[in-house]
Image (cartoon, rainbow, N blue to C red):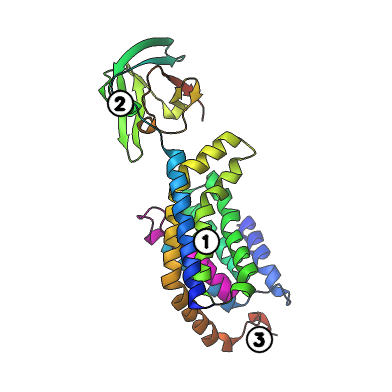
Amino acid sequence: MRSRFRMAMFITLPSHRAGKGDMSTQKLTRIALLSAILYVSKVALEFLPNVEIVTLLIIIYSLVFGKESILIVTVFNFFELIQWGFGTWWISYLYVWPLLCVITLLLKKILKEEFVAWSVVSGGFGIIFGSLFAVLYLPIDPAYALSYWISGLPWDVWHGGFNFILMLILGKPLYRLLMRLKKLFKEDGDQPSGNKNCS
Amino acid sequence: MTKKQKITLVAVFAALLVIIGVVAGVVNHRATQAGGKQFTIEIVSERDDYENTAVYHSDAEYLGDFLRTMDSCQYEESDYGIYITGFDGMEQDLDNQYWWCVSVNGQAATTGADEIPLQDGDVYNFTLTQGW
């Protein structure tokens, strides 16, 4: 009981400090919902090897919600850990998906709302997907890293092709939908919840 | 972005995909030999104090195909192809981290036996290995 209490203190204490670090209830809920959608979309398509809409969703999340997408993929990564348990692939997940957020955020100003270009980004990410995992094995065993990458390359091409097509078809409508929803809920503001009613 | 630019971009990406696909296919292609082949199979298990080397002949294309015809080989069929569980009753023991390691000409195999082409003169070694 005592340790539980301490944990509760640890979790609740930061929220009492009003300031920039506070996360509004709306933001917290948004992250929870969007990461849940991300996870469910992955589970739903697991029966099709290397066909996924995780890449598509992460790019769209990054375009609509900016840096917040990094928090969303972090929560998603923990869902994956809970489902599959720890493996070296999970260490890769910790940098692979946030990297996609960073790539999107960097290209956002150049590519704007050109979804044909985003399709190329999404497809390209599918092609390099295997190499991003192989990188982890490089310092341990370069020969293994190379054979791991090469033997998976046909699947990377397959992955890239589907990523490209899915973004081409679903990218724009999904982006518009999320932008509309974002505007719809903007009235509540992103103010820290504690400041509004309790101060 | 004009329509022409969009079409060009899609075409370039499609071409890139095809090129990488072909390269991936070529580098992953393992040529198989037709006809009869003579090769050596070594089975080693320190746990069972066992070591056996024998020469075999087969027309099989892949090592996996040959192992299925080998009486002393115990195996399971998995989604990834043949999975060797034992030889001559010397079974793997996953609880104690014993598994059968496959090597081709002294090099640990990077693919399953169903993807190892049977080549004339090759030496296939199966060693019961402990530890992951």
User: A163 and A175: which one is in front?
Assistant: A163
Chain letter, disc 2 residue: B
Position of residue A96 measured from the top left corner of the image (x, y, whole percent): 57, 55
Distance (Cα) linking label 3 and label 2: 78 Å
Q: Nearer the viewer, mark 3 or mark 2?
A: 2
Q: Is residue B115 left or right of residue B16?
A: left
Q: Residues within 10 Å of mark 3 (few under 14, many from 20)?
A: few
**Mark 1 vs mark 3, CA separation in Å:** 30 Å
Q: Residue A196: which numbered mark, if any? A: 3
Provide the residue span drawn in magenta: A42-66
Quote the CA–CA distance across marks 2 and 1: 49 Å
**In-image side of A28 versus B24 (left or right):** right
Q: Residue at 36% of width from left, 55% of height from top?
A: A48
Q: Write down the residue under mark 2.
A: B34
Q: Is residue A28 visible?
A: no
Is A175 in front, or is A45? A175
Could you say where residue B120 lies in the image, as x and y percent from the top left? 37, 19
Q: Are marks 2 and 1 on the same chain?
A: no
Q: Which residue is mark 1?
A: A76
Magenta highlight on residue A55: yes
| Residue type beneath disc 2 | Ala
Left-right relation of B66 to A100: left
In this rendering, the label closer to the viewer, 1 or 3: 1
Foreground label between 2 and 1: 2
Task: Determine if the magenta segment contains residue A1.
Answer: no
